[in-house]
Amino acid sequence: MKRIHLPLLALVLVLACLPVSIQAQQLSPKWEELTGPDFIHAIAQAKGVCALPIGIIEKHGPQLPLGTDLLNVRKAVEDAAAQEYTVIFPPYYFGQIFEARHQPGTVAYSLDMQLHLLQETTDEMGRNGCKKILIVNGHGGNESLLPLFAQAQLAKEHDYVVYVFGLPRLEVPGRPPVTDHLDMHAGQTETSHMMANRPDLVHLDRAGQESGADEARLKLPENVYTGIWWYARFPNHYSGNGATANKQLGEFDMKTWSREIAEALRAVKADDVAPRLQQEFYEEAKHPLDTKQ
Ligand SMILES: [Zn+2]
């Protein structure tokens, strides 16, 4: 009589289960790369958490491509999805960029179009099982638009929750030094990110062809806002000096960025408070006089 070899049996059982788990691990996080049937598994694997990276199409100094923000935010989200699985919506760049309308290649949709398109996009994501949507912003000009959009979700009932992950906090211990003191747009940091992500699209030798200096033409108190402020400071739509970029900084930052997005995805997956309270709020908002005072 043969003895059953227990470790061998365990190994056989593990191997028998493997095709399923390999199949699950191999699902692309990219919405547009999934088949219809695989999409169902992908949403289940993501626990209904989907990511909507938002970039923009605008001039990025004389040295970077128009799609810099779109390319970089998508790379950061794709790397985050490898750490914490999510389904990533296809390329989306319909954000706020009126301040660069005077520059070649800028695509600036009207404000109501931006809001409608974003609402219809999240509605369609929700209809397809994305019950928690993490909008990941890659463009400074969207930093007011996206919280406004998230706030506006309380105006009407939705069966999904919108979360916004704003621009990342990159000043973390161990970061290579940033020597460019303006560095707000297409400067050292952003050029470094693109050098890490798509070096083939960086024309570092052209970074000095235009000035990224602050022209400081508008004199107003700090707490007075006006839309022309950016043009008043940076008419070339370039802030800082891209020539100071380096790949080491870019690689470090891209890692920080994707790690922070992965942490946000994990937190959103674990969050059962926002969906519950949002639903409770919608119910109360239907008859506010009945809300306990
Ligand atoms: Zn940018």
Image (cartoon, rainbow, N blue to C red):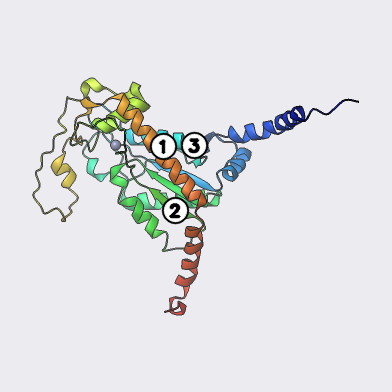
Quadrant of the image containing the N terminus: top right
Residue plotted at (60% across, 39% down): 36
Q: Is mark 2 on a helix, strand or loop?
A: strand
Question: What residue sits right under mark 1 in the picture?
Answer: 258
> Quick one: label 3 or label 1, which is nearer the N terminus?
3
User: Considering depth in this image, is 255 or 183 the residue closer to the camera?
Assistant: 255
> What type is the residue that disc 2 sits on?
Val
Residue plotted at (44% across, 63% down): 156
**CA–CA distance between discs 2 and 3?**
21 Å
Q: Number of numbered discs present?
A: 3
Q: In this view, does 283 lie to the left or right of 245?
A: right
> Quick one: label 2 or label 1, which is nearer the N terminus?
2
Can the viewer see residue 236 in this picture? Answer: yes
Q: Which corner quadrant of the figure contains ligand 1?
A: top left
Q: Do the residues labelled 3 and 1 touch (CB within 8 Å)?
A: yes
> Quick one: label 2 or label 3, which is nearer the N terminus?
3
Q: Residues within 10 Å of mark 2 (few under 14, many from 20)?
A: many
Question: What residue sits right under mark 2 in the picture?
Answer: 162
**CA–CA distance between discs 2 and 1?**
19 Å
Residue plotted at (75% across, 27% down): 8
Q: In this view, does 276 lie above or below 215?
A: below
* In front: label 2 or label 3: 3
* In front: label 2 or label 1: 1
Q: In this view, does 189 lie above or below 153?
A: above
**CA–CA distance between discs 3 and 1?**
9 Å
> What type is the residue that disc 3 sits on?
Gln
From the top left corner, tell me how far across and down residue 144 is, in percent: 30, 51
Checking the image for residue 83, the label placed there is 3
